[in-house]
Image (cartoon, rainbow, N blue to C red):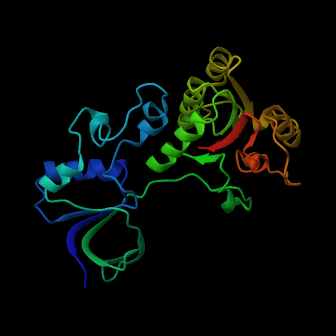
Amino acid sequence: MGRAFDYVIVGGGVAAGYAAHEFVKRGVSHGELCIISEESVAPYERPALSKGYLLPKDPVRLPSFHCCVGTNEENLTPNWYKEHGIELILNTQVKSADVKSKTLLTSTGETISYKILIVATGARPLKLEETGVSGSDAANVCYLRDLADAERLVNVMQSSSGGNAIVIGGGYIGMECAASLVINKLKVTMVFPGAHCMATLFTPKIASYYEETEGGENIVFDSIARLKNLRNFIQDIIEKCGIKLIEIPTKLNPTDAGTKVIRANEVSKWNHLWAFGLVV
């Protein structure tokens, strides 16, 4: 039998960090709380990954944005967890959970028991393979979910200055990434499923104003709903980027806002002009 805790948090994101902070404020004792995370660092403010982390000048880096700096409270560095007797189990996944016996089996083979389990794994981007499309391992296909993703995106941007980027997604993260790409001297095409960007927040009038004022030469906004022929759009993007077309699926679902576009970009560069897809 492995270790036992009163409280176990599965997931090492923002929710885990703020939950740990609240536990301490409420007087949790040393050794009662454990956090299991597949990442290699203590919980941090994920919003920084699509903001300051991507800037070419004076980018933010850990430990400056661990939880809970987002609410102007303590910066919960790894030492903070040690000082408060909270066990951080990093680089570890939970492979299975037995809710009857209240035990977890981790990727290291350890069995951890709990009295109360908090599942705070959050969400993640949809991988291409989950839609029946290959290409996630291509050098120019990036996702943005965790620190490793952000670091990879930074490296791709640095090697692609002056090139073109396709951002799949028109919400907060997509918009922030598009802005960062422009700052890094890339031209951006945004593709999203709604009638306009930020469809869950912006009215059509606000979105139109934003697209007109913020787009210009550096950002092209393309809604799937506005594209008469998605196949032709993909072909145009590939020609603009100087990329050889490998395959375009014969059947394209207009609701697939970003799964089919990237498949065409599996060849990562042509001379000095790069293009890559970003799923957010």
Residue 88 position within the rendered picture, expressed as x and y whole percent measured from the top left: 26, 60
* Residue at screen point 75% across, 50% down: 266
Relative vertical location of residue 136 with respect to residue 52 in this rendering, above or below:
below
Q: Quadrant of the N terminus?
A: bottom left
Question: In front: 232, or 277?
Answer: 277
Q: Is residue 272 above or below residue 149?
A: above
Compared across the picture, whether 174 is left or right of 43 comes to right
Q: Residue 155 location in percent, x, y?
A: 54, 40
- Percent position (x, y) of residue 79? 18, 50
Residue 47 spot, x, y in % from top left: 43, 38
Q: Measured along the vertical axis of the image, is residue 98 above or below residue 169?
A: below
The C terminus - image quarter: top right
Q: Residue at x 66, y 24 (%)?
A: 204
Picture layout, residue 215 above or below residue 155: above
Q: Is residue 206 left or right of residue 10?
A: right
Q: How many marks?
A: 0
Residue 171 makes an appearance in the image: yes
Outermost residue on the front side: it is: 271
Question: Is residue 146 in sight in this rendering?
Answer: no
Locate residue 64: give its quadrant: top left
Relative to residue 148, is residue 117 drawn left or right? Answer: left
